[in-house]
Each structure stands twice: as structure tokens, then as C-alpha cells.
């Protein structure tokens, strides 16, 4: 079954063709970093305009590159939430038009479920049960996945998402947008133990919520109370990153113990972070847990993960009709 995936929830326009939910034929991603960079974050109106400009040409490019004809497409899967409402609407409208004109099923996909299914593309399988560490620019959660579509959210962030914290701290350090990749890069030259930034909400071993706003404030106070010549930016970045990573790793391991699970999956843009990948790998080896890390291209937003999640929704009989809308605040367990 060949599914076309469409993703426009934030600042990436992506079109993918995926066979049987596992095999990527192609996965085109057009980043909008060039237009949002100068504003230090995503400007929703600009994101929408760019999606409108590039989505249709990308669909045509996908067919041409994949040597696929319209009639070869068996279904269209599209992100319908959560995300920026205007940006989501563009993908949903185009997907509806395709489904209607080609007379094929339309599958509305929850973006968060897409991040989980990025692991399906990587390994061709998702082990059940697993603990998923979902870490993106908009979300930070630990999820127990017991089967296809069977999710239990164990904990989430109470304030900033961890990707958002990376972006905000990078902005304070004048490192540009998005901040995660730059902090990751310059941290390699810094000392992660130099500044003891706080690790929040660690006392209660059975609490899987996160909080990153206190850490962000600590970085603000540190920068305000020190002269520029008293610290190196690399040390601040590395110490901040270490505080985030320590919490993510420790809480993921604790969740596997509490729920007696031996697999951890990672999803979302922060899953690209090299320190997180390194520390989680070492810790999982020590604890005898199998770690599943998607390729970095499947961590950040892409349509292949949407097509994969869409395939497994279709197999469960979950398809949409033309009343499908954009749901900016959709949660993982909410029915569409
Ligand atoms: O999943 P994603 O592409 O979009 C959302 O669904 O939010 O994640 C984007 C987030 C941004 O906050 C970005 O700074 C962060 O992922 N990110 C990283 C890295 N690469 C991307 N954070 C830390 N280290 C990285 N290498
Ligand atoms: Zn995402």
C-alpha cells in the first residue's frame, strides 16, 4: 500500500511516499529556517504563506522523483494537529483535495503519533510495550505504548517543551534559531560540569512530569550576574544541555522500571541531540534496556513518519472523512 504523507504543522513543509508503513520511497523536507531565523522563532503567518507556495510543487516533485503516477497512490495521510492552526489547515485542505479527486482514503494523523512511528521507518518494527521519550519543540512527554494506538501519557512538561528551552537559551546567548542544533554543536567545546544548573522535579521517583522554565531562568540569572569575560558561552551551553539531558535520561529509565518495560524509543527534534543520544545509549546499556534511536532525519518533522502512522491507522480501520479539520491543541490520546 503506497501512502502519500503530508506534514505542515509548523515550519517544515514535507511530502513523503511510504510503502506499507515502513519503506520510505522518498521524504522531501523544505525547511523554512531562512525566513524565521531573523525573528528568533517561527512567525505563524510567514510559515503559512510558505506552505502555500511550496506544498503543491513539492507534491509534483515527489511524484516525478519517485516515478509514481497519481493512480499509484492508495491513500493520503496528513497531520491534522497539534500545531499552528493556519499551517495545519493548508496541509489538510490539500490532502482533502487529493483524496477527493483521486477517490482514495483520507487519514488524519496526530503529529505526536507520527513522532512515535518514526521508529517504524527506522527499524520496520515497534516493540510493545515500550516507553517513548517524545522531545520536540512543542512537546516533552514520556509515553507508555502498549500496542498500535494504545498510549498512556506518563508525564509531560508543565511549562516549556525542552526544544523550546534549547531555542530560548540559544536566543539569550545570541546563537540564532533554531537553537538546539547550535547548542549541541558548541557544547562539544564546553565543560558540562562548569555551572551546576538545576535538574527540576527529580525528587519524586514516580513523577514523570518535566519542568524547564526554572532552568531557563537560572541561565538568565547566571548571565545577568556575570560579566561577559567571566564565562565562556560554550560552558554555559554545555552545562545547560547537560541539565536537560540528565533529567530526560533519568526519568526515561525510571519509567521503564516502574512499568517493567525493556525498550525505550525516542521521538522528536531534540532526539537529534548528540549528548542525549550518547548518555541514553550508555545508560541503557548499563540498565539492560534496548534503546531505539531513529535516524536524525526521522527525529525532526517529516512526512514519512506521518505516512507510517497513517498506514497503521488505516490498518486499524481509522480513516477520516471530509469533515476533517485542523486541531491545533490535539493531545495524543484524543480521538480525531
Ligand atoms: O520535532 P521538531 O522538528 O518540531 C516540533 O514538532 O516541535 O523539533 C524541533 C525542535 C526545535 O526546538 C529544535 O531546536 C530542536 O528540535 N532540535 C534540537 C536539535 N535539533 C533540533 N535540540 C537539541 N539538539 C539538537 N541537535
Ligand atoms: Zn514535531
Image: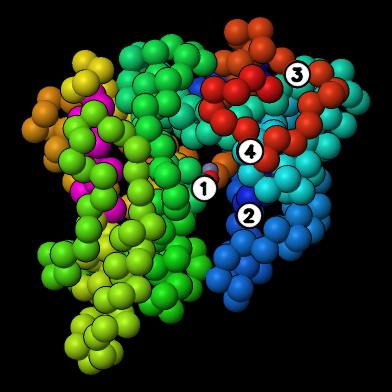
Residue depth check, mark 2 versus mark 4: number of the one nearer the observer: 4
* Residue tagged 4: 329
Q: Which residues are magenta?
A: 244-256
- The answer to whether marks 2 and 3 mark residues whose Cβ atoms lie closer than 8 Å is no
Disc 2 Cβ-to-ligand 1 distance below 8 Å: no
Tag 4: Cα neighbours inside 10 Å, few (<14), some, or many (≥20)?
few
Q: Earlier in the sequence, mark 2 or mark 3?
A: 2
- The answer to whether marks 1 and 3 mark residues whose Cβ atoms lie closer than 8 Å is no
* Residue tagged 3: 320
Q: Which residue lies at the image location 24% right of the left edge and 85% below the top edge?
A: 226
* Residue tagged 1: 138
Q: How is the image coloured?
A: rainbow
Q: Which residue lies at the image location 23% right of the left edge and 81% below the top edge?
A: 232
Q: Which residue lies at the image location 45% right of the left edge and 72% below the top edge?
A: 171
How far apart marks 1 and 4 lie (CA) works out to 11 Å
Disc 1 Cβ-to-ligand 1 distance below 8 Å: yes
Residue depth check, mark 2 versus mark 1: number of the one nearer the observer: 1
Amino acid at each position: 500500500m503506497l501512502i502519500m504523507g503530508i506534514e505542515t504543522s509548523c515550519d517544515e513543509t514535507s511530502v513523503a511516499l511510504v510503502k506499507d508503513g515502513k519503506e520510505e520511497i522518498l521524504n522531501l523536507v523544505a525547511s523554512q529556517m531562512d525566513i524565521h531565523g531573523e525573528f528568533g522563532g517561527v512567525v505563524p503567518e510567514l510559515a503559512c504563506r510558505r506552505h502555500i507556495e511550496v506544498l503543491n510543487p513539492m507534491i509534483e516533485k515527489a511524484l516525478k522523483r519517485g516515478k509514481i503516477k497519481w493512480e499509484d497512490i492508495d491513500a493520503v495521510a496528513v497531520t491534522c494537529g497539534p500545531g499552528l492552526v493556519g499551517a495545519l489547515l493548508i496541509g489538510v485542505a490539500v490532502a482533502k483535495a487529493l483524496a477527493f479527486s483521486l477517490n482514495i482514503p483520507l487519514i488524519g494523523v496526530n503529529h505526536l503519533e507520527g513522532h512515535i512511528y518514526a521508529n517504524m521507518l527506522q527499524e520496520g518494527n515497534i516493540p510493545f510495550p515500550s516507553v517513548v521519550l517524545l522531545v520536540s519543540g512543542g512537546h516533552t512527554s514520556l509515553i507508555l505504548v502498549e500496542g498500535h494506538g494504545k498510549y498512556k501519557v506518563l508525564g509531560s512538561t508543565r511549562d516549556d517543551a525542552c526544544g523550546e528551552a534549547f531555542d530560548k537559551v540559544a536566543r539569550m546567548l545570541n546563537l540564532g534559531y533554531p537553537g538546539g542544533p547550535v547548542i549541541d554543536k558548541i557544547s562539544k567545546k564546553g565543560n558540562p560540569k562548569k555551572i551546576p544548573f538545576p535538574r527540576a522535579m527529580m525528587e519524586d521517583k514516580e513523577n514523570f512530569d518535566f519542568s524547564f522554565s526554572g532552568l531557563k531562568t537560572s541561565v538568565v540569572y547566571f548571565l545577568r550576574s556575570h560579566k561577559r569575560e567571566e564565562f565562556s558561552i560554550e560552558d554555559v551551553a554545555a552545562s545547560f544541555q547537560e541539565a536537560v539531558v540528565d533529567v530526560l535520561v533519568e526519568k526515561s529509565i525510571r519509567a521503564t522500571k516502574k512499568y517493567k518495560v525493556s525498550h525505550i524509543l525516542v521521538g522528536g527534534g531534540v532526539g537529534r541531540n548528540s549528548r542525549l543520544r550518547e548518555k541514553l545509549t550508555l545508560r541503557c546499556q548499563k540498565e539492560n534496556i534496548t534503546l531505539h534511536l531513529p535516524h536524525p532525519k526521522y527525529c525532526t518533522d517529516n512526512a514519512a513518519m506521518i505516512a507510517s502512522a497513517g498506514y497503521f491507522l488505516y490498518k486499524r480501520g481509522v480513516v477520516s472523512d471530509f469533515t476533517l479539520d485542523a486541531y491545533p491543541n490535539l493531545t495524543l490520546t484524543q480521538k480525531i
